[in-house]
């Protein structure tokens, strides 16, 4: 398996980066967000990779962070979600953390903004990945990402999140507002804490 590529960026298109490693050129599918962060052609580059092997051929996908790679691999494990949709999802959100936050918050409308993803698929993605984000790859993200604030009770955190989302705050705003929340706080206390940080409490 190819774990990563370290070489020179030979060029890129709207969805692919071309990385030259010791005279061999690799075509690597990447999200638009990652492609935008790549250096100019001719500059050194290193990307984490996922190799997909199918009966009709092989395809290589690249990522600038372990978080992005982990989320991509979780997404393609969902029934009906292929690499194209997974990359579209990573391209739709400003960061892997933002996408993970939307999934963890069960924000169907946000996930549904991904091109090619309808309400049914968005619901399936959330249903199949929420547990993984809570207990697995969520640990890769920082306190502003998908993982609940350290120490806060899961029931209280979920209640506070739902209340804040219903008020119109975005998933990113909710995550930031709940960062560093008091340990073992209930939903009401967490809501007050978040609103104070958001500047909405008196």
Image (cartoon, rainbow, N blue to C red):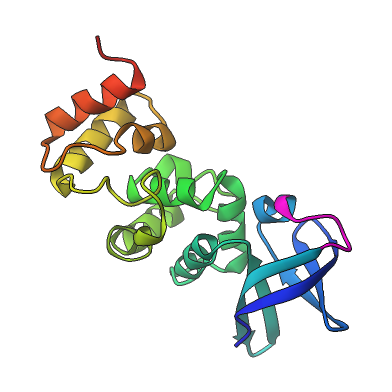
Q: Residue at x 61, y 55 (%)?
A: 88
Lateral position of residue 134 relative to residue 94, left or right: left
Range drawn in magenta: 37-43
> Residue 170's spot in the image, x, y percent?
42, 32
Tell me the residue at 72%/74% (across/down). 6
Which residue is at 73% across, 50% downward?
36
Q: Is residue 88 left or right of residue 200?
A: right
Q: Nearer the viewer, residue 52 or 142?
A: 142
Magenta stretch secondary structure, dominant: loop
The percent coordinates of residue 41 (x first, y second) are 87, 60
Give the number of marks: 0
Snapshot quadrant of residue 156: top left
Residue 41 among magenta residues: yes
1, above or below 165, in the image: below
| 134 relative to 101 in the view: left or right | left
Q: Note whether residue 167 is visible.
A: yes
Q: Residue furthest bottom?
A: 55
Pinpoint residue 147: horizontal percent, then vertical percent: 32, 52
Up/down of 202 relative to 120, above or below: above
Judge from the rendering whether residue 42 lies leftward or rightward of residue 99; answer left or right: right
The quadrant of the rendering that contains the C terminus is: top left
Q: Work out whether 172 lies above or below 66.
A: above
Residue 129 location (% of width, % of height):
36, 61
Q: Quadrant location of the N terminus?
A: bottom right
Single out the residue that lies furthest toward the top: 202
Q: Image height check: is 112 above or below 7? A: above
Q: Does residue 116 appear in this view?
A: no
Query: Observer-nearest residue: 161 or 5?
Result: 5
């Amino acid at each position: 398996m190819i774990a990563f590529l370290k070489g020179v960026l030979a060029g890129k298109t709207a969805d692919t980066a071309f990385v030259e490693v010791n005279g061999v050129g690799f075509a690597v599918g990447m999200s638009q967000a990652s492609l935008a962060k790549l250096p100019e052609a001719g500059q050194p580059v290193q990307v984490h990779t996922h190799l997909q092997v199918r009966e009709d051929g092989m395809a290589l996908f690249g990522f600038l962070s372990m978080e992005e790679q982990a989320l991509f691999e979780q997404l393609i494990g969902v029934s009906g979600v292929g690499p194209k949709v997974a990359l579209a999802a990573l391209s739709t959100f400003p960061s892997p953390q933002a996408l993970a936050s939307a999934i963890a918050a069960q924000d169907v409308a946000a996930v549904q903004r991904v091109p090619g993803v309808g309400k049914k698929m968005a619901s399936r993605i959330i249903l199949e990945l929420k547990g993984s984000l809570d207990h697995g790859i969520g640990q890769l993200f920082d306190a502003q990402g998908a993982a609940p604030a350290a120490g806060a009770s899961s029931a209280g955190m979920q209640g506070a999140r739902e209340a804040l989302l219903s008020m119109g705050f975005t998933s990113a705003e909710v995550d930031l507002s709940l960062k560093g929340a008091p340990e073992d706080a209930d939903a009401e206390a967490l809501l007050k804490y978040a609103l104070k940080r958001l500047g909405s409490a008196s």
